[in-house]
Image: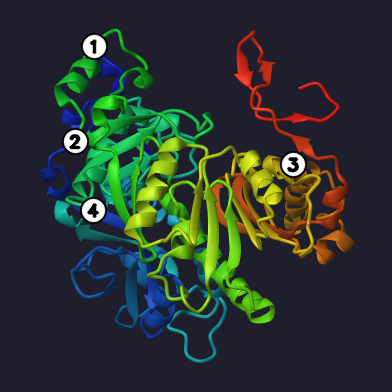
Amino acid sequence: MVQMSPLPPLSTLPSSTYPPSAYPSPSHFESSSLIYPALLIPARRTNEIQTTLKELVFKEAKRKRVYALEEGLDYAVEEVTNGYDPKKERKLVLSRLGPADTFSGEDEVEAAQHDKVFQNPIIKTIIASSAQEDSSGSTSPNGKPEIRPSYMRLSASPYSLLSVDQVLRRIMPCRNDDSGEASNENGNPLIEEIPSSFEVAGHVAHVNLREESLPFKYLIGKAILEKNKPKIRVVVNKIGNIENEFRTFPMEILAGEGLDLGLVEKMCAAQEVSDPNKIQIKVGADHQSLMQVELKEHGCRFKLDFAKVYWNSRLSGEHDYLVKQIVTSAHEELKVTKERHCIVADVMGGVGPFAIPLTSANASHYHKTPILCHANDLNPVSYHYLEANAKSNRCFSDRLVKHNLDGRAFIHKMNNEGVDASHFIMNLPAAAPEFLDAFRGWNFGSSKKIPTIHVHCFGEKARGPEETSRVHTQVLQRCERALGCPESLSGPEGRERNKAQVRIVRDVGPRKNMFCVSFLLPEEVQKVEKLVLDVNNKREREGGVEESLPFSKKGKES
């Protein structure tokens, strides 16, 4: 099956990147009818099957997904012969996982009938199970499936009703089947995954494009921008890893405000540029005001500079979950202790996604469950916005204490000053477990309060239920190594005693998950040699470049 693309071959372009001007006009999307995968189903089971396949059925505004097999409907005669009764049949249109209009004639029908959607385990099971004889009055002959793969021709939707995913499937040469083809008829490589998902922070849409999608980056940006106006004003792409201590990353502008269209068109027309990574409008000082965003999350308003602080809108659910969990725990604790408030220490607090909702006077628990939060972040820009967000959300100084320290120094400060925190939040997924070494030599004090630690981290994704235990053990062992307390979390006895739990926060990639590990700080940690912090120490990197070493271990060279 060979795809036909609305775009010229990459090989005919001066550079390796499609310019913004290559984006097809709306008429391209509306000029023809489209063929979609479908299922022939018994009319009596329509509601049941629609419910079962609710995530896979065709979804477009003001469009039907179920059709009767009336005269003139586009279907093959052989689909409803040999004992099937067309009057008792319906066609249920499915979402297309392959390209939407890049085939013609018989190839188009074949592509729809072999679309990836039919490889979905739910659909395969429904089709296979329908072959069983139905004693209650099946519409199919005995032994033949009453649910069969089919196709459906629909008139094209107006461009205004198409989603980002639908637009990109009609532009990009995406892989439709398992034929092994590596390119379309233009010689353009087939895309494995349509990059239609994006993160939103205020008026900024943020994507993280794979290498295979970079030649189409300005078309992707324009599709996202046009389909999300006026809320989205600019689309940016991550062009590097989070490598600095402030968890920020470099970005380029793909569409919207801040994009110099003339310059981009000129760079795309340059013969000597063959790498899409060299055609970039990087987010810089000139875009400072554009990166100032405002957003609302769980009743709180946040201001931040998206280019200079860490913010991930995909963690919105985790912010809400952990805040509610801590408030519930604090409520039960205060009923027993009768203390004035429950203390929480947010070690890598950023602009306040945990600290602000925990301490805002607007929160429903403010009077019933008083919480005092010590919120810290090393990034001075994050600290600035933490202060601003505290003021705008009525987080008063007797409930929210702000710090601008290294994470390890902050943990030591809490212990040295006798701050009896009931919870420590450590939201630095790339490295938070390693910061647990700051708890070594912990002084539990006269209160003997044992805090609960909540550590966010990345880890391996289990391929099946049988691997879950192994993956969770790996994550727990990473934490206990930093604490210097073997078996305190991963061992059966230690895991039960310290109430160690591993929870999946979100799916990060094909082999990667983000986890939250929660546990009581093991009492054995007080016997481990305390970490000595020395901000003036230096160590030598490979290549002879020096870097600050934020800590050293007593009795060892740093």
The residue at which mark 1 appears reads as: 270
**CA–CA distance in space, label 2 to label 4:** 34 Å
Looking at marks 4 and 3 on the same chain, the residue that comes earlier in the sequence is marked by 4
Viewer-nearest residue: 460 or 193: 460
Exactly how many numbered labels are in the figure? 4
Residue 363 picture location, percent across and down: 42, 71
**CA–CA distance in space, label 4 to label 3:** 59 Å
Of badges 2 and 4, the one in the foreground is: 2
Looking at marks 2 and 4 on the same chain, the residue that comes earlier in the sequence is marked by 4
Viewer-nearest residue: 509 or 392: 392
The residue at which mark 4 appears reads as: 34
Is residue 226 found left or right of 522 in the rendered image?
Answer: left
Amino acid tagged 4: Leu
Dot 2 lies on which element? loop
Q: Is residue 351 visible?
A: yes
- Where, quadrant-wise, is the N terminus in this rendering? top left
User: Label 3 near label 4: C-beta < 8 Å?
Assistant: no
Looking at marks 3 and 2 on the same chain, the residue that comes earlier in the sequence is marked by 2
Is residue 550 found left or right of 211 in the rendered image?
Answer: right
Amino acid tagged 1: Ala
Residue 415 picture location, percent across and down: 70, 50
Amino acid tagged 3: Asp
Of badges 4 and 1, the one in the foreground is: 1
Residue 448 picture location, percent across and down: 79, 63
User: Label 2 near label 3: C-beta < 8 Å?
Assistant: no
Residue 227 picture location, percent across and down: 21, 50
**CA–CA distance in space, label 3 to label 1:** 52 Å
Dot 4 lies on which element? strand
Amino acid tagged 2: Glu
The residue at which mark 2 appears reads as: 257
